Image (tube, rainbow, N blue to C red):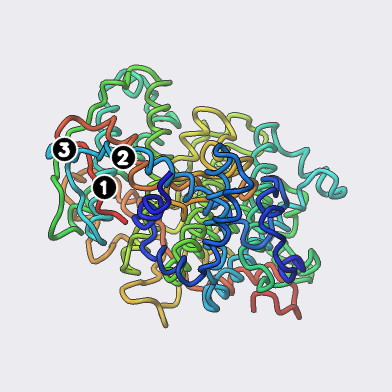
Amino acid sequence: MSDNLQPRGSDDTSFAQPLYTPIKRRSFFMYAGATAGATALVLAGCSKDNDPVTSSNLINVGSGDTGVLNYAYALEQLEAGFYTRLRTGTYYTGLGSTSAEKQILDDLYYHEVIHREFFKAAITSGRISDSLTPDFSKVDFNSRTSVLGTAMAFEDLGVAAYNGAGQYIASPLYLTLAGKIVSVEARHAAIIRDLVGEATFVGNDVVTLTTANTSGVTTNNAPANSSLERSKSPAEVVATANTFLAEGSKLDVSGLK
Amino acid sequence: MNFFQIISEIEKVDPEVYDRLDSRRSIFKHMTGLGQKLSAAAVPLALGSIFNKVYAQTPVGASVNDVLNFALSLEYLESYFYQRSAAGSGASAVTLRGGFSGTNLAAIDLIRTDEANHVTFLRSVLGTAAIADPGAATFDFTGGKGAAGGPFADVLTNPLTYLAVAQSLEDTGVRAYKGGAALLMSNKTVLTAALNIHSVEARHASRLRTMRRAGPMNNAASQGLPVSPYNAAPKSWISGTDNGGAGGSPTGPTAPIYGAGNNTGAPTGVTFDAESNTTQGGAVLTGLPNTTGFPASAFSEAFDEALDVTTVKTIARTFVVNGNNFLA
C-alpha cells in the first residue's frame, strides 16, 4: 500500500491509467467519478430542449424517509402480486405437493406478502396507494421458464433497489429495517437463480465479479473484481419496475435523492 | 459542450459539487490544459477524469474506518476459511474437494473468489488505514482455538462440517454488516459499498444452506428438501433460530449466531433481536392483514436480524487461536 504515499503522477499519466490497473486506494472513487462525468454529459445533451414531461398519471412516492418507504412498499406490492398470481398458473399448480420448488415458491409468497403488509402498517402518513395495479402480461404463468425468469428479475431488482436506496434514508431504524428485508431478498434471489441454473447464486450480471458497476448515481459503483452487488438508483429500478405496472400505477421516484 | 450545464446536472446528484469544485480551483487549470491536448472525441472521458480528482479527495472518517476494518477482519476470517478448500492447498483440500459434486465445488470456489475480492476491495478503500493481514495461523476453523477437541474437529476434511462452518460464517457476516450499516450513514459511498457486500454475503449464505439440505455430492442442490427444525437441512433463509443453527442444538456452538445481541449503545430505535423475532418497527407481524393461514415460521423468516459489533466479535473469535488478539 506504499503507493498511497507517492505523489500523484501528472494529469496525462493518470488519465492514461488502464482500467485493469491493480486496485489501489481510491480507485473505487475514481470509477465513481468517471460515471458522474459521463452521465452528466448524456443529460447535458438533451436537457435543453427535451425536458422530461412529468405525467400526472404517475404515482409519486414522495421524498425523504417516507419516499424511500413508499418506494419499497411499491416494489413489495409488485413482488407480492407476482407470487400471488403465479399460484393460479399451471406451472405452480402442477408442482408436487412436497416438491422443493413448491415449498420455495410458497415461502416466497408468504415472505413478500408479509413485507407488503409490514410497509402498509409502518407508513402511517403519506402512504401511496395500497392497490397498485400490476401488469404481468409479459409473463406466462404456465411456464416454469417464464415464472422463474420473472421471479429472478424481481428478486435481483429488489436487492439492487434496496441497496441503492439506503443512502437516502435518514433514520437508523429505517435503514436497519431495510437491511433486514434486503438480505432476505438476496437469499430469495440466490435460490431462484439456483433453480434456473445451479451455482448461479451470484454472477457478473448482479455482482461486480469481472466488470465494474456503472450506475447513473455514482455511490452505487464499484470496480471490477470487487464482488459487490450492482446496486441501482431509484430511476434505474423504476425503468424496469414500471414495465410491470399498469398505466396509472407507474412510479415517479424523482423525489428520492 | 456547455460546461456549466454539466455542473448543474451533477449538482442534482451531488448538491455539494460547487463546494467541491470551489475548494479546489485548480480543476479549472486542468480544463485549460486539456483543451489543447485532446480531440473533441476524447473530451468526455477526460472530463470524467477531472471529476475523479475531485471525488478522490472525499475523506473517510475515523469511525467509518473502524467499522470498515471490522468488516475487513470478518472478510479475512472468511477468505482464509475458503482458502482451505482451494485447489493446491494441501492434502485436506484434496479430500474436501473430492467430497463435493461439480456444481457445488464451483459454488465454493465462486464464494472464495468473492471473499478474496472483498478483502482486496476493503483494503483499497481503507488504504494505509487498513489493518495488517492477520495470516493463516491466526485461525483455527475447528473451533478449538488452537487446541484439539473443537466442535468442528473434522472441518477441513469433512464436506458436511465444512458447509456447516461456512454457513455459520456467512450468516454471521450478514448480521454484522446489517448491524454496521447505521454506523456508516455519514458516508454515503462507504455505506452503499457495505450494503453491496451485505447482500452478496446473504447470497452466499443462501447457497450454502441450499447445498447443506441436498448434500455436498448432489449436483441438483436446489431440489433438496428442508427438514424441520432446520439445523441439519436448513431452508435458504433463517427459520426461527434454526434450532441453534449448523452446530446442531439451541445450546450448541453456533446458537449465538441466531440469538439476540447486546443493545447497549445501539443507534436510536435499533435493537439486536434474535432471528426468531416477529415484531418489526413496532409492528406485530403475526397480526397483519392478509396473512391468515400463513405458517408461524414465515413471520420470522421474512426478516433477518442485525447484530452488534461486540457480539459478532465474540462469535468470530470462536475461530481465532488463543493468545491472538485478532478481533478482540
Q: Residue furthest front?
A: B36
Q: Quick check: do tags 3 and 2 share a chain?
A: yes
Residue type for callout 3: Ser
Above or below: residue B196 compared with residue B94: below
Residue type for callout 1: Val
- Identify residue for label 2: A238
The answer to which of A113 and A245 lies nearer the viewer is: A245
Question: Which mark's residue is nearer the viewer, 1 or 3?
Answer: 3
- Where's the N terminus of chain B, which quadrant? top left
Which residue is depicted at the point 48% across and 68% down? B180
Which residue is depicted at the point 29% across and 62% down? B280
* Side of B274 where B89 appears, left or right: right
Residue A163 position within the rendered picture, expressed as x and y whole percent measured from the top left? 42, 52
* Side of A192 where B73 appears, left or right: right
For disc 3, the neighbor class at 10 Å (few under 14, some 14 to 19, many from 20) is few
The answer to which of B61 and B307 lies nearer the viewer is: B61
- Identify residue for label 3: A55
Circle 1 marks a residue in which chain? Answer: A
Residue A165 occupies quadrant: bottom left
* Side of B298 where B149 appears, left or right: right
Residue B3 position within the rendered picture, expressed as x and y whole percent measured from the top left? 43, 51
- Identify residue for label 1: A253
Circle 3 marks a residue in which chain? Answer: A
Of the two numbered discs 3 and 2 on the same chain, state the one appearing first in sequence. Answer: 3
Above or below: residue B21 compared with residue A250: below
Residue A146 position within the rendered picture, expressed as x and y whole percent measured from the top left? 39, 21
Do the CB atoms of the residues marked 3 and 2 lie less than 8 Å apart?
no
How far is mark 3 from mark 2, CA to CA? 15 Å
Do the CB atoms of the residues marked 2 and 1 lie less than 8 Å apart?
yes
